[in-house]
Image (cartoon, rainbow, N blue to C red):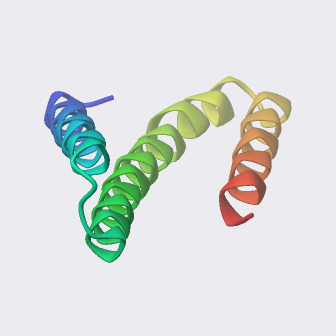
Amino acid sequence: MEHSDKKQVLNLLKTSRGQIDGIIKMLEEDRYCVDISKQILSVQALLKKANLKIIDQHIKHCVREAFSIGESAGNEKIDEVIKLIDKYAK
């Protein structure tokens, strides 16, 4: 993974971690449920963005590299991505 992309994913994950800590505190303080739910949705969006960046980098680098080795290696990587997207879509 390229340095700038790795840094972006790390920042997204660290922000998510901070927000999760905030959500836990909100629950402990018996804050309004809708506000808690909004924060959870916000974390989910950050995690989704981080995951898409990782998938993007995998396709651009690992899958491309596998095809340079050979078609069967490339097809294996494509199958991995398809299975991952299938899980992602559920």
Q: Nearer the viewer, residue 6 or 43?
A: 43
Residue 65 position, x and y percent, is: 55, 30
Q: Residue furthest bottom?
A: 34
Q: Nearer the viewer, residue 6 or 2?
A: 6
Picture residue at 62% right of the left edge, 30% below the top:
68
Q: Is residue 34 above or below residue 31?
A: below
Q: Is residue 72 above or below residue 33?
A: above
Q: Is residue 47 left or right of residue 11?
A: right
Residue 47 position, x and y percent, is: 38, 50
Picture quadrant of residue 5:
top left
Picture quadrant of residue 10:
top left
Q: Residue furthest top?
A: 69
Residue 88 position, x and y percent, is: 66, 57
Residue 19 position, x and y percent, is: 21, 46
Q: Residue furthest right?
A: 72
Q: Is residue 75 left or right of residue 88?
A: right
Picture residue at 21% right of the left edge, 41% below the top:
25
Q: Nearer the viewer, residue 78 or 18?
A: 18
